[in-house]
Structure formats: C-alpha cells, structure tokens
Amino acid sequence: MEEQGEFLPLPGEDEGGHIRIASEVVSVIAGIAAMEIDGVAGMASGGLVGGLSEMLGWKNLGKGVKVEVGERECTIDLFMIVHYGVRIPQVAERVQDNVKRAVETMTGLRVRGVNIHIQGVAFPEAQREQEARAR
C-alpha cells in the first residue's frame, strides 16, 4: 500500500484503485458542522499566542480544526469561540455529535473522538460597548 501523506484512506477501497480524502477536506467538513450548532460564535485559530483568539469567517473554517489521521479513522480537535450565556457543556456535546455524524457520513471514516477546545466567549455588541465605555 502506498504512503498516505496528507490524504485519508476511504474505507471500502479495493484492488480497483485507491480513494484518498485530503485531511483539509475533513477539517472543512468538521468546521462547517461545528458552525451549524447554536451557541458557536466562530472558530479560533489553533496556535493562539498569549491567549489571544481570532474569530474566523466561513472561508477559514478549516483553520480552527486539527485532524489526526489513523489507518481508517481520525481524531478531530476543534478550537471554538462560544456566545456569552450558553451552557458550554451542552453546546460542546451537540458539536461533537454533529461533527462526528457529518464526517462519518460524508467520508466513511470512523471518528475516534472530537475534542473541543473553548478558546473564548463572544459578547453581544451592546455589552462590548458598555465595557469599552467603562474603561
């Protein structure tokens, strides 16, 4: 079998050829599935310096996702920002379920785990303005 590189093997490949899915594809699927859940404000860049996080738009969903690849399975780490006032454990559990379902359905890969890293809290615009005036 040839070396996988940055591509994931698709279960069910046979002697007729190989099907490979780029790990970046899995990252985008996971990022979109995470953003579908109420309470998620955005994705955060994975390599945070000094606790600073950067909200990333729809174009960059794969940047808040890290995928570790096994033979026919993967582990996903999501770096997220949640809305102020949400119940973080409930939001995280819904994200885990949605990401796992989306990745397994679309790629055929088994998801061993979806690890959630909450990197920040997004406040409503009115509250941000009050905090700015208070300073």
Image (spheres, grey):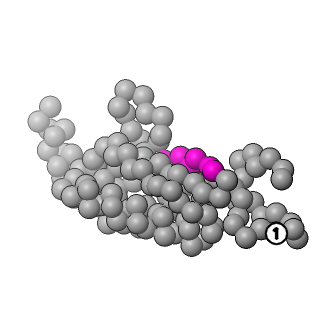
Q: How many discs appear?
A: 1
User: Which residue in the structure is indicated by mark 1?
Assistant: 14
Above or below for 30 versus 5: below
Q: Secondary structure at mark 1?
A: loop
| Residue 114 among magenta residues | no
**Range covered by the magenta-colored residues:** 62-70
Between 44 and 102, the one lying in front of the other is 102
* Residue at the image point whose x is 58% and y is 47% from the top: 68
Residue 74 shown left or right of residue 99 in the figure: right
82 to the left or right of 104: left
Q: Is residue 63 magenta?
A: yes
Q: Where residue 51 sits: x, y (%)? A: 35, 31
Nearer to me, 122 or 21: 21
Residue 89 percent location from the top left of the image: 26, 56
Where does the image place residue 99, in percent across and percent down from the top left? Answer: 47, 63
What residue do we see at 76% from left, 49% from top? Answer: 4
Residue 29 vertical position relative to residue 121 in the rendered view, above or below: below
Three-letter amino acid code at disc 1? Asp
